Image (spheres, rainbow, N blue to C red):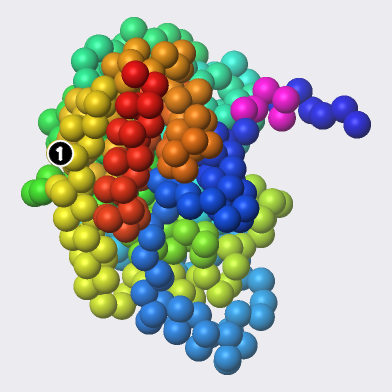
Amino acid sequence: MRLSKRIQAVTPSATMALSSRAKELAMQGKDIINLSIGEPDFNTPEFIGQAAIDAIKVSKTDSYTPAGGLPELKEKIADKINLEHKTHFSNQNIAVTTGAKYALYVLAQVLLNPEEEVLIPLPYWVSYGEQVKLAGAKPVFVKPEKGLKVTPADLQKYTHHKTKMLIINSPNNPSGQVYSRLELEAIGKWAAERQITIITDDIYGKLVYNQTQFTSLLDLDEEISQNVILVDGLSKTYAMTGWRVGYIAGDSEIIKAVNSLLSHSTSNLSAVSQYAAMAALTGDQACVEKMRSEYEQRLNILAPLLDNVTGFKLMDKPQGAFYFFPDIGEALNLTGFDSANNFALALLEQAGVATVPGEAFGYPNHLRISYAADVDRVKEAFERIEAFIESYK
Ligand SMILES: Cc1ncc(COP(=O)(O)O)c(C=O)c1O
């Protein structure tokens, strides 16, 4: 069987690969601390699951729904966005998708032509570049001159007539960095002046810590916000990764195109999940704050401990999401590993700690460590990492 050139050009998701190897080892009875995963360790709040059960019981979930989602769900999503960002979206501006991941995939398909280029700041979430390639377009990775956030000057260096789109992810996976309002204004203005569409991936928008203010590009002046397409979802905010609820908000013409693609690919997001999503959005939001403050506590306990691990340097303390992304260059020197990739593989096999190497995010010499896990287990993981490094010295 000959595979398509498109799929041959795609690199399988490294986060998935490591996490499945970790699961394999755990199945063999090894004591694995899995810090490679990108999902909350909480259960979906009970009232959300109950709403899904109730909907099933009265057979509301038996049929196809419109491809872009139930009108009443889209209405609730639009209301929420309008309330939070002072926008004026209606149902025509919303499409519900099978996770934010598919929202991004669909946008690449409906917006990009072959040869067009998409600016993707480093470090990036693993799927952006591959999705752009699957649409036949070209990902262009932008390395920040300083720190872990890009500026218009960084972006300008990689921009020319083929540049069509920019993806901004704040809070960022993997770095945990959050762009300030001022930083976003500069980027938003720069992009609007050049008619470069911005996709803002706000999936971690509710997970910010220690008084950090979350600003979305949608919050900014109309000149900027009109040039922005929002991608968001319920996975991280409500511990609902398995329910696969994502959505897009933007210009109605784009949404029409999205709906058309959805109708020929997934049809609708599972109706069960759509009823669960409505409950999540309209129910008591105390669950969101409860999980957020738990992550915050973990961050504050664990960040100094991680910084103390020999050869690990946490350049900028994360302000959002639930990952550490330390520079491990010195640990590589001490242990003799030639890459974060080989370090992470050995760490998993020998010390039973699963992490994701920076290469997966286009950022060598770093390691992504999730703290969406029990705090004592993460502490134990840090001790194992220390012993692992020690054993090579
Ligand atoms: C930055 C970012 N965007 C999008 C997604 C996709 O989320 P989902 O498809 O679960 O909605 C993830 C999940 O890990 C993510 O980290």
**Residue at the extreme right:** 1
Q: Quadrant of residue 149?
A: top left
Q: Is residue 228 above or below residue 2?
A: below
Near-viewer residue (2 or 12)? 12
Query: Callout 1: few (<14), some (14-19), or many (20+) C-alpha neighbours within 10 Å?
Result: few
Specify whether residue 294 is painted magenta. no
- Left/right placement of residue 292 relative to residue 200 reads left
x 67%, y 23%: residue: 9
Q: Nearer the viewer, residue 141 or 300?
A: 300
For badge 1, the amino acid type reads: Pro
Q: Quadrant of the N terminus?
A: top right
Residue 220: x percent and y percent? 19, 40
**Residue segment shown in magenta:** 7-11
Residue 47 against residue 67 in the figure, above or below: below
Q: Quadrant of the C terminus?
A: top left
Residue 160 in the image: x percent, y percent?
A: 42, 9
Does ligand 1 reach within 8 Å of label 1's beta carbon? no
Residue of label 1: 304
Q: Secondary structure at mark 1?
A: helix
Regarding residue 231, the answer to whether it shows in the image is no
Residue lying at 45% horizontally and 33% vertically, measured from the top left:
347
Q: Is residue 166 left or right of residue 325?
A: right
**Front-most of residues 29 and 358:** 29
Q: Position of residue 95 (x, y in %)?
A: 49, 56
Q: Taking the image as drawn, is residue 372 in sight? A: yes
Q: Classify residue 14 by image quadrant.
A: top right
- Which SS type dominates the magenta stretch? loop
In reply to whether residue 9 is colored magenta, the answer given is yes
Residue at (13% x, 31% y) in the render: 182
The relative height of residue 186 versus residue 338 in the rendered view (above or below) is below
Taking 98 as reference, is 194 above or below it? above
Residue 169, percent across and down?
34, 37
